[in-house]
Amino acid sequence: MARSVPRIQDVAHIAGVSTATVSRALNKPESVSEQTRAIVIEAVEKTGYRFNQTARNLRRRKTGAIVVLVPDLGNPFFSQILSGIEKTLSKSGFSVLIADTKQPDFGHDRILEYIRYNRADGLIVLDGSLPPGTYDEASTGRSNTPIVFACEWSDGVPLPTIRIDNRAGALMAIAHLHDLGHTKIGHIAGPSENILTKERLAGTQIAVSQLGLEFPDKWSFPGNFSIESGSRAAKAWLDLDDRPTGVFCASDQMALGFISELSNHGYLVPDDVSVIGFDDIEIAGRFIPPLTTIRQPRSDIGTVTAKTLLMQISGECHDIQPPLEVLPVELIIRRSTGPVKTEARGQKQHSGSIDPEISTRRTAL
Amino acid sequence: MARSVPRIQDVAHIAGVSTATVSRALNKPESVSEQTRAIVIEAVEKTGYRFNQTARNLRRRKTGAIVVLVPDLGNPFFSQILSGIEKTLSKSGFSVLIADTKQPDFGHDRILEYIRYNRADGLIVLDGSLPPGTYDEASTGRSNTPIVFACEWSDGVPLPTIRIDNRAGALMAIAHLHDLGHTKIGHIAGPSENILTKERLAGTQIAVSQLGLEFPDKWSFPGNFSIESGSRAAKAWLDLDDRPTGVFCASDQMALGFISELSNHGYLVPDDVSVIGFDDIEIAGRFIPPLTTIRQPRSDIGTVTAKTLLMQISGECHDIQPPLEVLPVELIIRRSTGPVKTEARGQKQHSGSIDPEISTRRTAL
DNA sequence: AACGATTTTGTAATCGATTACATACAAAAA
DNA sequence: TTTTTGTATGTAATCGATTACAAAATCGTT
């Protein structure tokens, strides 16, 4: 046991061939005679040799790593997309490196580091809020580190993007509320500069105006996708004289925060207000009431993104236009939305002879 | 613009010194005269030079990467710990590599790869369910890749571990239920081989027997930490003739699934049964009702783990015993637990003249 | 000025693989 | 038999930094 980790030289020595032959036997088996190949394989097995990734990377001028820029690691929505990415990339032998862009010490120039100095073989960006100039080198081809956007993107930056149709999602949400008879519809938005916020708000506005509904500013609540901001929106809703009877939230987390805060004030969903979310995070279907929402195919987003990046890296993609993949969304109807009530809140709606407590329980589900 | 990325040679050439001097000026500034240092710095700035991580790693026989083995990336509990790890390690210049051990294609020998072939400078294991033999080389010092356990661990494996006091957490949970008058206490457990399951179950049994309570098998429900398994436990609870009035769940997710399923069947928490969880994931405080739970300091676990690993890597840690850090847990009382009711379920409990519907709403909060 | 001690700098080996190029050898064609 | 072609293998350069060792420059002392 002279050395702890065997090198290609050790294998070559045992097999009685040169290092070049060992390398070829392992990387391009057809370029080596069947005999020597067998001898080499045997020597590899005897020594337990594994190639040194670092040395290979240096020689090949690759890093073997893909960096994923996540806006918020703590958010369950992203962690599941990440899971899909990791699965696909690790299968292709890449390491997945994660950086949280909302960490206080994340400098935006770290991206430039990755792009400019070849610190990664590719980049997946889940955060559209980075300054657009960041991508100049990548989009003009001056950098050879491919970048793919997923979920979010940066307007006007011509890079491959995997996303869903956010406007269509908003349209579906508003249409659903309208089908239930709601004419006074509110919206809780994400962070104002966010591209998803803009798209979902735009979709809402289009839908609302097509349906000929009013949509005053006071029915549009600010938020930032977080649970807490949903709960703040609830307080704003409570302060209103003329309240929307249906509220479309730009994220499930805000929807849950909204419902939760209303519940703290003795209001019930969907009795007092119908609420629809966006994302379909795991807990949505198990909330009380189960949340009606627009589902995003999270795992698919992850795998499609990873595959797109792999194609970019291998150079298989010869399109002139950077690929744009728009995955479908789906309306999941659960119990946080219901027919609009005409009565003012506080009036009871007992139906005949049913025990009032049980009745309330039913509606509370 | 001859080369896209400047090398140390380019800097050396411009500064009129050797590559060795440039390297020293950057890595050991005190070993170089003030003059040359200034010249080198200037040349570095002029060229925009950044060292090539791969080349450095090859020479230093390091990889610059830490691998984190996560049992389930989609679980919000882990993603927040991960966030703490990433923050600390990236500050020290390490890349964080993530592997999902529950991915179908995750071979357990991948860990051996990391340990044996120096594919990473260190390993953080959040999954205690890997075969104990895996760590032989690491714990006997035959491998020089340090490993640190966090949250979970492998019994009898003498490696540094950062965790909470699971038994104490269980004790606090049971004591809380007992304080509220509950004498019939049930438990929803995690996956049976899991070390946390065992500890929390053991804590429950100790507490229950110290308090002189009965704890029949049928009050111990199987689970696997997931929302779904909590909901299955709810069905089992419903099937019981003699039901526990307080249930301690080994994870928040199971608690939420449990409450959700009960709600689907018209049962209310804490009216019909008090429920306490474990973890304090973000949504817990916003569930309906807000979940009483045992809080784990997730972010702390992440940072302490990362720091411990860094010490192991730098060799600063000269303890004979591998360090064991037990972080404190905290009982967070919210509204999913309440005083035990003596009445049988289904009897109304209207208090005087209050509108019954409003009354129910209150208790439903 | 001469000496040794100390600081600063340069030369070249090294980390461990990949691969361009050269060479050896066998089979096919002349 | 000689020449050509093609396949299989070896030699050595290379990727880009770090660092052991040697050489040179600087300093203080006598």
Image (spheres, coloured by chain):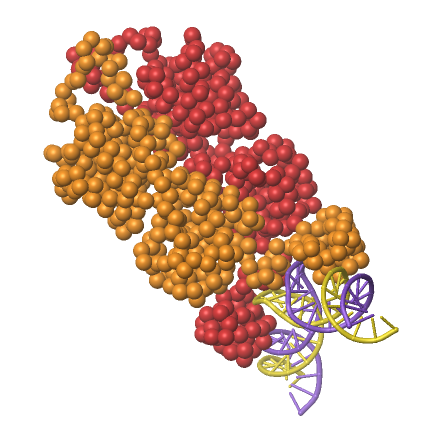
Chain colours: A orange, B red, C purple, D yellow
Q: Measured along the vertical axis of the image, is residue D29 above or below residue B239?
A: below
Q: Is residue A16 left or right of residue B254?
A: right
Q: In this view, does D23 lie to the left or right of B150?
A: right
Q: Closest to the observer: C1 or B338? A: B338
How far across and how far down the image is residue B154, in percent? 60, 33
Task: Say which residue appears at 69% left-offset and 55% top-offset.
Answer: A30
Q: Closest to the observer: B349 or B36? A: B349
The reply to whether residue A79 is in sight is: no
How far across and how far down the image is residue D1, in percent? 88, 73
Task: Say which residue appears at 21% left-offset and 29% top-offset.
Answer: A180
How far across and how far down the image is residue B61, in percent? 63, 57
Q: In which quarter of the image is residue B132?
A: top right
The reply to whether residue B181 is in sight is: yes
Q: In which quarter of the image is residue A25?
A: bottom right
User: Which quarter of the rendering shows the C terminus of chain A?
Assistant: top left
Q: Closest to the observer: A61 or B360? A: A61
Q: In this view, does B354 lie to the left or right of B207?
A: left
Q: Measured along the vertical axis of the image, is residue A327 above or below residue B171?
A: below
Task: Say which residue appears at 36% left-offset and 46% top-offset.
Answer: A326
Q: In this view, does B12 lie to the left or right of B273?
A: right
Total label count?
Answer: 0
Q: Measured along the vertical axis of the image, is residue B116 above or below residue A232?
A: below
How far across and how far down the image is residue B263, in percent? 34, 20
Task: Say which residue appears at 50% left-offset and 66% top-offset.
Answer: B50
